[in-house]
């Protein structure tokens, strides 16, 4: 089997495999970017418990697939509710806008300046460590020469010089290990070509990001080059976003909490107040005509119907006209017939003839009658129906 560690052509592949490998095991990190629309997949940390957040998806009425971010590791283990659960579309948009706005030519030039300064400091530290190695090497060579120059017959001196030589060799080995370790952990500075490409990124990245042909997987890879992790904390009214960038900078964002479906489709309080005023003096069919004539709609933005207005009044405890009139003491046909000692059909007949007053309270022709009315005198030739 060939040694895949040799050769520059395999290094990008090895780096990608190393980035994907931590997605397995207990120490799970970002994992490989997938095709789903969740931009921050694998980068989210719960602001309450510090655990990594997972991604779920739901489909809207128009067929759009949108992400939901939740912290449910502890909930799965203990059978409890998720620690946090929030819609991800607004969070993704806020983070993407922040990253694109941050990548201005001025910000990139500042980042390049800082990078050059860090590279200069790293070079100074490298020279200091190299000097320590060189000093340790000289000390080891001097100890070696002293040991070789001693008389072999003088065993006490020879043993002491040999022990000193061994110690100097160990010091040289430690200094060399520290130097090599520091060199491996130090990234090389930017070349002129790389600097120019980074400057061009300020204008190229927004266009590339907004290009519909750019796959979501590539957008995730771009965001991972700039963002280390994102911590989310949902409050009653906002979602607080803490971004940690690759260079170590930290930024905080806050966006309004996405409204739930029932909040989005709730009839506004102003409309509820108008409905209360209208149904206080009108029947439902009349109120529907008045409300639609004013251009008012319910929570779903649709015109009112009798059924929708009836359900809304029940849900908001808005008394209908019949309930208001009953509360004012008006009588039903049966109650007035019992009060006057006549049949209920007589009450209906007197109302049609205008001998008593009443008010229609629904679309089925039900009436309520004013109290304290007297039975009219029956004209000649007409009999008043008395209850049996």
Image: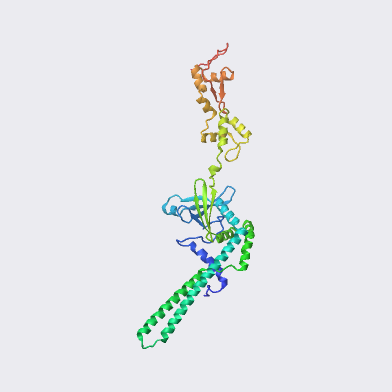
Decide which of 323, 147 is in the foreground and name it.
147
Decide which of 314, 68 is in the foreground and name it.
68
Decide which of 84, 300 is in the foreground and name it.
84
Above or below, 122 against 349 in this view is: below
Above or below, 346 against 64 in this view is: above
Residue for point 60% across, 30% down: 286
Total numbered circles: 0
Residue for point 52% across, 66% down: 17
- Residue 18 lies, in percent from the top left, at 51, 66
Residue 97 lies left or right of residue 165; in this view the side is right
Whether residue 322 appears in this view of the structure is: yes
Whether residue 214 appears in this view of the structure is: no
Residue 102, by quadrant, is: bottom right
- Residue 355 lies, in percent from the top left, at 57, 17
Decide which of 309, 19 is in the foreground and name it.
19
User: Extreme top residue here?
Assistant: 380
Above or below, 179 against 325 in this view is: below
User: Colour scheme used in the picture?
Assistant: rainbow
Residue for point 43% across, 83% down: 144
- Residue 154 lies, in percent from the top left, at 36, 87
User: Extreme left residue here?
Assistant: 156
- Residue 279 lies, in percent from the top left, at 56, 30
Residue for point 49% across, 47% down: 235
């Amino acid at each position: 089997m060939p040694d895949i560690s040799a050769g520059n052509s395999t290094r990008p592949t090895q780096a990608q495999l190393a980035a994907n490998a931590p997605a397995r095991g207990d120490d799970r990190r970002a994992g490989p970017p997938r095709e789903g629309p969740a931009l921050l997949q694998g980068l989210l940390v719960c602001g309450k418990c510090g655990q990594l957040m997972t991604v779920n998806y739901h489909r809207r009425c128009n067929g759009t697939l949108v992400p939901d971010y939740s912290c449910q590791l502890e909930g799965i283990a203990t059978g409890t509710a998720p620690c946090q659960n929030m819609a991800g579309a607004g969070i993704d948009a806020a983070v993407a806008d922040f990253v694109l706005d941050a990548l201005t030519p001025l910000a990139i030039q500042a980042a390049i300046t800082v990078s050059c300064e860090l590279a200069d400091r790293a070079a100074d530290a490298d020279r200091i460590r190299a000097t320590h190695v060189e000093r340790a090497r000289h000390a080891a060579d001097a100890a070696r020469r002293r040991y070789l120059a001693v008389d072999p017959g003088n065993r006490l001196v020879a043993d002491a010089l040999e022990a000193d030589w061994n110690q100097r060799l160990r010091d040289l080995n430690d200094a060399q290990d520290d130097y090599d370790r520091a060199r491996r952990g130090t990234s090389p500075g930017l070349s002129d070509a790389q600097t120019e490409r980074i400057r061009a990124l300020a204008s190229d990245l927004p266009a590339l990001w907004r290009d519909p042909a750019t796959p979501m997987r590539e957008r995730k890879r771009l965001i991972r080059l700039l963002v280390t992790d994102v911590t989310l904390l949902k409050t009653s009214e906002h979602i607080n976003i803490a971004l940690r960038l690759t260079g170590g900078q930290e930024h905080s964002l806050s966006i309004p909490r996405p409204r739930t479906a029932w909040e989005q489709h709730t009839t506004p309080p102003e409309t509820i107040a108008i409905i209360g005023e209208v149904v206080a003096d009108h029947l439902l069919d009349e109120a529907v005509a008045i409300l639609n004539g004013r251009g008012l709609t319910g929570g779903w933005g649709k015109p009112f119907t009798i059924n929708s207005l009836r359900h809304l009044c029940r849900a908001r405890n808005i008394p209908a006209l019949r309930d208001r009139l009953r509360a004012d003491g008006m009588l039903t046909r049966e109650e007035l017939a019992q009060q006057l000692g006549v049949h209920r059909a007589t009450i209906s007949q007197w109302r049609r003839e205008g001998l008593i007053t009443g008010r229609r309270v629904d679309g089925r022709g039900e009436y309520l009658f004013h109290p304290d009315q007297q039975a009219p005198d029956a004209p000649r030739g007409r009999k008043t129906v008395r209850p049996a």
